[in-house]
Image: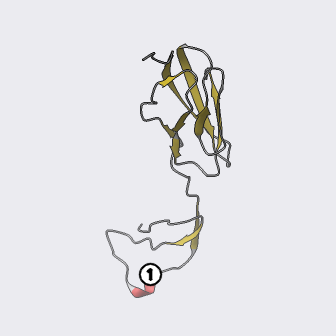
């Protein structure tokens, strides 16, 4: 059986016997429903940069696979930061500390979710 499904729908296939081959009088044509599942949803977190309290912060997280559009959520962000619908963590942090951040992306089909954890450190601004 041969065929490559490039999108959802029907795929024409030809099935032959290896022992007798596919003589013209032995061919039959039909359709076979094929379901193509989207690639596995994955969150991509390059190392998130640390930041400084009182200084604007921005970092982008990304996802691959699944079925866009995606919905983003994040827990454990320091006060002053949020995550947007485009996966951008931004804002101005107000409190020093080390934060354990969990970023979750949910796709629009099943929905399927993928989760990644990262650590962010926000320090006091240095005095000159």
Quick one: SS at disc 1? Answer: helix
Toward the viewer: 107 or 34?
107
Name the residue rendered at 55%, 52% in the picture. Answer: 38
Provide residue 4's location: percent of width, then percent of height.
Answer: 45, 66
**Picture layout, residue 126 above or below residue 81:** above
- Give the position of the N terminus as an image quadrant: bottom left
Toward the viewer: 58 or 32?
58
Name the residue rendered at 40%, 72% in the picture. Answer: 16
**Picture layout, residue 73 above or below residue 123:** below
Name the residue rendered at 44%, 70% in the picture. Answer: 15
In this rendering, the count of numbered labels is 1
- Give the position of the C terminus as an image quadrant: top left
Name the residue rendered at 56%, 23% in the picture. Answer: 101
Provide residue 81's location: percent of width, then percent of height.
Answer: 63, 28
Q: Quadrant of residue 127?
A: top left
Taking the view exactly as shown, the residue that stands out farthest to the bottom is: 24
Toward the viewer: 100 or 107?
100
- Direction from residue 8 to residue 44 in the image, left or right: left
Q: Quadrant of residue 84?
A: top right
Provide residue 50's location: percent of width, then percent of height.
Answer: 46, 25
Q: Residues within 10 Å of mark 1 (few under 14, many from 20)?
A: few
Taking the view exactly as shown, the residue that stands out farthest to the top is: 97
Q: How is the image coloured?
A: secondary structure
Q: Disc 1 marks which residue?
A: 26
- Direction from residue 13 to residue 76 in the image, left or right: right
**Picture layout, residue 31 above or below residue 111:** below
**Picture layout, residue 91 above or below residue 66:** above
Taking the view exactly as shown, the residue that stands out farthest to the left is: 19
Provide residue 98's location: percent of width, then percent of height.
Answer: 51, 14
């Amino acid at each position: 059986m041969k065929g490559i499904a490039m999108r959802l729908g029907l795929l024409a296939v030809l099935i032959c016997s290896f022992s007798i081959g596919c003589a013209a009088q032995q061919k039959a044509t039909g359709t076979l429903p094929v379901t193509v599942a989207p690639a596995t949803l994955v969150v991509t977190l390059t190392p998130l940069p640390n930041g400084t309290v009182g200084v604007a912060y921005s970092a982008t997280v990304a996802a691959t696979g699944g079925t866009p559009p995606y919905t983003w959520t994040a827990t454990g962000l320091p006060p002053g930061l949020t995550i947007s619908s485009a996966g951008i963590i931004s804002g101005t942090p107000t409190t020093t500390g080390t934060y354990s951040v969990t970023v979750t992306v949910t796709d629009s089909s099943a929905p399927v979710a993928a989760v990644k954890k990262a650590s962010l450190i926000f320090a006091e601004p240095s005095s000159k």
